[in-house]
Image: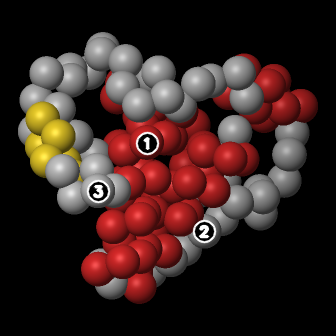
Amino acid sequence: MGNTDFGKAAKSDAGAGFEETVKRIDFTRLSPRELREIAQEYYDAGKIGHDTWLELSSELPVQTLNANGEVIDISNVTDDTDFDFLSYFSDRAEIASSIGTTDEAQKMQDILSFFALV
């Protein structure tokens, strides 16, 4: 289900203040805890779909693949460790578009769109 809700929620003054704060976030240096908090705010406001929220809120695996197919050990990343989520999800998007399913590729594109939005 590629349910993307970007921009469908009405903007309020309170939401605008939150969005201004989020726009300064560097997704190349963000802890998993911070990403979950941002994703929860956007999900609660109806600005991202359930699948996007779920993916952004999920725990990281102990290993991942980069776009070149190399195994990367990320077992040292804790809830409070800065992590490059932009590269992580960009690599996943590239892999999904090459060898994954259409649904997986769309999910990764939704996440990258979320990063571009904020």
Q: Quadrant of residue 95?
A: bottom left
Residue that badge 3 annotates: 68
CA gap between label 3 and label 1 equals: 12 Å
Q: Secondary structure at mark 1?
A: helix
Decide if residue 74 is on the left or right side of residue 112.
left
Q: Residue furthest front?
A: 68
User: Residue at horizontal 37%, vertical 44%?
Assistant: 88
Give percent across and percent down for residue 117.
72, 47
Please, what is the three-letter code of the amino acid marked with disc 2?
Thr
Please, what is the three-letter code of the amino acid marked with disc 1?
Ser
Instruction: Please state which of the two labelled residues, at mark 2 or mark 3, is closer to the viewer.
Output: 3
Q: Quadrant of residue 102?
A: bottom left
Q: Quadrant of the N terminus?
A: bottom left
Q: Secondary structure at mark 2?
A: loop
Please, what is the three-letter code of the amino acid marked with disc 3?
Asn
Badge 1 density bin: few <14, some 14–19, many ≥20, Cα 10 Å: some
Instruction: Please tell me which of labels 1 and 2 falls first in the chain.
Output: 2
Residue in front for this viewpoint, 73 or 81: 73
Q: Which mark is residue 9?
A: none
Q: Secondary structure at mark 3?
A: loop
Decide if residue 64 is on the left or right side of residue 12.
left
Give percent across and percent down for residue 91.
38, 54
Scheme of colours in the image: secondary structure
CA gap between label 2 and label 3 equals: 28 Å
Q: Quadrant of the C terminus?
A: top right
Give percent across and percent down for residue 58.
28, 46
Q: Is residue 98 visible?
A: yes
Residue that badge 1 annotates: 87
Residue that badge 2 annotates: 4
Badge 3 density bin: few <14, some 14–19, many ≥20, Cα 10 Å: few
Badge 2 density bin: few <14, some 14–19, many ≥20, Cα 10 Å: many
